[in-house]
Image (cartoon, rainbow, N blue to C red):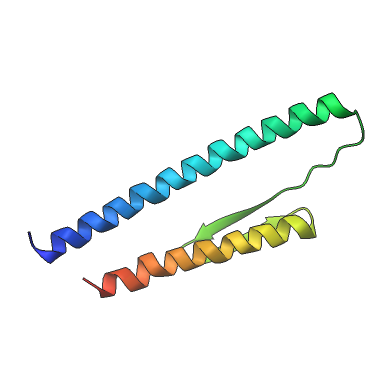
Amino acid sequence: MSTHIIITMKIITLGFILVLAGVLLLIIGMLSMAYHTICRSEAEEGETTVRGGGVIMIGPIPIIFGTDVGALKVVMILALLLMIVAVILLFVLPLRV
């Protein structure tokens, strides 16, 4: 096989692995939320607060939003990791072809 086909197969495999990792993170997050909701409802009926944040990636450029400083720190780390992955996929891998 030519090297072009092998590199294309590696990129496709990397894409599948990234999609699978994303799905696994979603499942883990949902299970974690369900577990904490059940534990909190059994323990006490105190005042609850909602925290959250998110990242919208437009190419390698992140748009970050959040409700408090703690959530923003987590989202900024996530945005940095996503930017690194985007730069690798968009700029570094095509140079190797």
The quadrant holding residue 90 is bottom left
Q: Nearer the viewer, residue 58 or 19?
A: 19
What is the x, y in percent for residue 97?
21, 71
Residue 60 position (above or below residue 50): below
Residue 18 position (above or below residue 32): below
At 41% from the left edge and 51% from the top edge, which residue is drawn? 18
What is the x, y in percent for residue 48?
86, 37
Q: Residue furthest left?
A: 1
At 45% from the left edge and 64% from the top edge, which residue is drawn? 85
Q: Is residue 60 visible?
A: no
At 8% from the left edge and 63% from the top edge, which residue is drawn? 2
Describe residue 95's horizontal placement relative to residue 54 as left or right. left
What is the x, y in percent for residue 20?
41, 43
Describe residue 7's horizontal placement relative to residue 36 as left or right. left
What is the x, y in percent for residue 76?
64, 63
The quadrant holding residue 73 is bottom right
Residue 85 position (above or below residue 92): above
How many numbered circles are shown? Answer: 0
